[in-house]
Amino acid sequence: MTVRLQPTSLRAALYTLGRCWAGELSQSEAHLSCDRLVGLLGGRRRASSCKHPSAAAGLFSHAGPRSNNEDSGLAAVAPGRFVAVAVADGVGGLKYGEIASYRAICAVLRGLVLAAGGAGWFSEEWFESIFDIAHEDVARSAQGGATTLVVSVYDLTSRALHVAHVGDSVAYIVLDRGAAEYQLLTQELDEASNADGPYITQALGHASYRRPHYYLYDLAGFSDYLKVLVAASDGVDDFIDKELYGGLADLYMRKKSATELARTLVCSAVKGGGRDNATAAVAVIAPGS
């Protein structure tokens, strides 16, 4: 039997190019250019904290000690369909990193708008297509820039968690079973090091790009637990105590704001000696979903 889901809009909060946007998009708008699509979200302003139309999703970004923030982030909800978080980190050492991350996160935004409208199901092929489109767009538009990208999508109908990434940006899940547990979802980061220091081995918009790493997690047995999805740049993950992830479920119960969870992660990284841009996108999935 084929299940037909009713189209719905996508409610999104976006950080890119040093600004925040938040609002709602429909499938009919997915064909628009990146600039017009993002502009429709409204609320354009310079900010670090990006509040989602729902308290259960949000993001926060900080330039850290750097003069320019090359990160982009996205938190999105399609009511009754899925929740998603994504982060793109413009590659250091290359020009136009902020343009690269912007184009990559826009490709994800467009794909999620189409998915909310009923265009296709999440699968490994779906993510490969999104990443290939993002790679081509970055290569065409970012004038030599490149970017990492991590995307985490929880399907509310199948209770499956899909994760895909290129580069060293990370995704985590926190499960509140009374005593919260956290797990790194991006298990094969594209990173290495040599005498000059660490570097990434694959990036969108760069000749090193091959294909995204993809993981599928069956969470049907965890429907009664509060779940927290996190996507973060290495400027967060490299500079915080990882146990901070485990405290996010309890913090949400007190703050009732996913944006505050993202702020906590980013500010902890910056205060902890962070040397890079720091961005976190967070979505909270209530028990029963």
Image (spheres, rainbow, N blue to C red):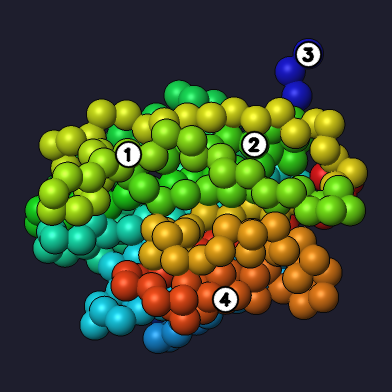
Q: Which residue is mark 1?
A: 190
Nearer the observer, 156 or 120: 156
First reached walking from the N terminus: tag 4 or tag 3: 3
Q: Residue 150 got which mark?
A: none
The kind of residue tagged 1 is: Asp
Q: CA distance from mark 1 to mark 3?
A: 40 Å
Check the image and name the residue furthest to the front: 195
Nearer to us of marks 2 and 3 is 2
Q: Residue 1 got which mark?
A: 3
Nearer the observer, 69 or 111: 69
What is the secondary structure assignment of the residue under circle 4?
A: helix
Nearer the observer, 206 or 45: 206
| Crowd around label 1: few <14 · some 14–19 · many ≥20 (10 Å) | some
Q: Which residue is mark 4?
A: 263
Q: Which residue is mark 2?
A: 161
First reached walking from the N terminus: tag 4 or tag 2: 2
Q: Is residue 202 above or below residue 35?
A: above
Q: CA distance from mark 4 to mark 3?
A: 44 Å
Residue 82 coordinates in the image, percent (x, y) = 67, 45
